[in-house]
Image: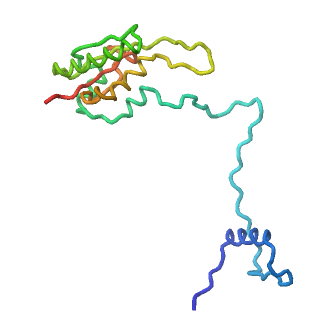
Amino acid sequence: MRKPRHLSADERALWDRVAERTTPMDPKRTRPILSEKPSVQPKPADPVPSFRVGERSNTRPSHDIAPTIKDRLSSAPVKMDHKAFGKMKRGKLKPEARLDLHGMVLAEAHPELVRFILGSSAMGRRLVLVITGKGKDRDDGGPIPTRFGVLRHQVPQWLSLPPLNAVVLQVTPAHIRHGGDGAYYVYLRRLG
């Protein structure tokens, strides 16, 4: 014969709440009492800190859902040699060629970038520098904010899409001596 299972205090409290809300099928029949133990109430949850109107909040909400370009590129896995990657990030590797996209609109910059990257790859170059500039603040104060530096945001995306992704191994923001946040190192795959 099986040993009877005894309810824990939490289970007993839950059962009592359920039993109080039910109506018996046979009103003449009384509800059996399972145990004479007093029911134990579960512990209340930690109190929520109060907030009064006019007080400052302890948390700072982020309105920008997408991570910054620097965060996104730095969290990308390193696909190239780690020693060369470290030198490149410190500005110790000299780019073999550079493309300056300053003053160009998206429609001009994209074909120029494709031509430059594919041409550099065909010439056997490994490290090139793409200068986008930091961009101008064009926010007109409207309800939808505009990004700071359109080319700076678009170039890494173009480099991750076909046909450029076939020849690009690594993209990272340039060291301050090569343009800092306004430029990118593009490390190309070795052909052959």
For this rendering, which residue is in front, 160 or 36? Answer: 160
- Residue pictured at 32% horizontal, 10% vertical: 100
Answer with left or right where residue 85 lies relative to residue 139: left
Residue 128 image point, x, y percent: 25, 18
The image quarter in which residue 146 lies: top right
Q: What residue sits 73% from the left and 31% below the top?
A: 55
Query: Image check: 69 left or right of 170?
Result: right
105 vs 101, nearest the viewer: 105
The quadrant where residue 106 appears = top left
Residue at (29, 29) in percent of width and height: 165
Residue 62 placement (x, y as % from top left): 57, 30
Q: Picture coordinates of residue 2 (x, y %)?
A: 58, 88
Q: Residue furthest left?
A: 192
- Residue 169 position, x and y percent, is 26, 30
Q: Residue furthest bottom?
A: 1
Q: How many marks?
A: 0
Q: Is residue 54 above or below residue 34?
A: above
Residue at x 80% of width, y 79% of height: 25
Q: Nearer the viewer, residue 26 or 3?
A: 26
Which quadrant: the C terminus? top left
Q: Is residue 11 above or below residue 166?
A: below
Coloring scheme of the render? rainbow
